[in-house]
Amino acid sequence: MKFFVDTADIAEIRELADTGLLDGVTTNPSLIAKSGRNFLEVVEEICGTVEGPVSAEVTALDAPTMIAEGRKLAKIAKNIAVKVPLTWDGLKACKVLTGEGTMVNVTLCFSANQALLAAKAGATFISPFIGRLDDINLDGMELIHEIREIYDNYPALETEILAASIRSANHVKDAALAGADVATVPPAVLKGLAAHPLTDKGLEMFMADWKKTGQKIL
Ligand code: E4P
């Protein structure tokens, strides 16, 4: 499974990129607003920080303007994935932009039929939002299972399932079990994935016993 981080905070992105385990970044207009920075500048900086796909979202609602915005965003760097919403206009824009060789992430997906349409439109990534479905008492993870099954029924569909709106470590694990290709994870949740109290306790014991030997490796 690939790990993307869901943030526009460049310090957080750098810290995670330094682990060598970060495969990409997703942003959205809310995350850009939270960063307080200029959209085009921060996206360019992120693209220079990670090698993998960096999702940057269009803000137009009609296909022609989405396509124009997408073309402008795609010029920022080779690793831009233009993010378009799952509307008919977004699907039209997806078809055109992927036809031009640009990666496209179709976002705000809340149903299996929407995911099927995005794949038919040639999306590079489909972003089903797990947490927002859970928020309204629906089953976000069930959607990941459904999309996986549908995509696997049609091997010609190459769209990657990008599990989004992840809120917890369990969401990451369950999305991996469901066969999501990618998880985009908030920085705090991503950093928390390595934590386990028994790891800390075990390491403490090993260090105490190692000290007793009086030895050094270097
Ligand atoms: C994905 O690309 C979105 O930016 C994100 O996962 C949305 O998550 P939220 O529902 O926690 O805002």
Image (cartoon, grey):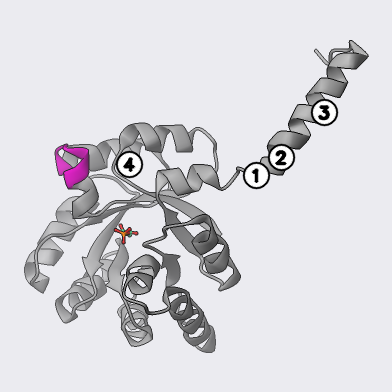
In the picture of the structure, the residue carrying the numbered disc 1 is: 196
In this view, the residue in front, 129 or 123, is 129
Q: Residue at x 24, y 75 (%)?
A: 86
Residue depth check, mark 4 versus mark 3: number of the one nearer the observer: 3
| Up/down of 86 relative to 217, above or below | below
Of the two numbered discs 4 and 2 on the same chain, state the one appearing first in sequence: 4
In this view, the residue in front, 190 or 48, is 190
Q: Are marks 4 and 2 in contact (CB under 8 Å)?
A: no
Of the two numbered discs 1 and 4 on the same chain, state the one appearing first in sequence: 4
In the picture of the structure, the residue carrying the numbered disc 3 is: 206
Whether the magenta-drawn stretch holds residue 34 is answered as yes
Q: Calculate the distance from the C-alpha at mark 2 to the C-alpha at mark 1.
A: 5 Å
Q: Calculate the distance from the C-alpha at mark 3 to the C-alpha at mark 2.
A: 10 Å
Of helix, strand and loop, which one carries label 3? helix
Of the two numbered discs 1 and 3 on the same chain, state the one appearing first in sequence: 1
Of the two numbered discs 4 and 3 on the same chain, state the one appearing first in sequence: 4
Where residue 177 appears, as percent x and y from the top left, is 60, 70
Please state the extent of the stretch shown in magenta in the rendering. Answer: 33-39
Asked if one can make out residue 69 in the rendered structure from this viewpoint, the answer is yes
Where residue 216 appears, as percent x and y from the top left, is 84, 13
In the picture of the structure, the residue carrying the numbered disc 2 is: 199
In the picture of the structure, the residue carrying the numbered disc 4 is: 47
Amino acid type at circle 2 is Thr
Residue depth check, mark 4 versus mark 2: number of the one nearer the observer: 2
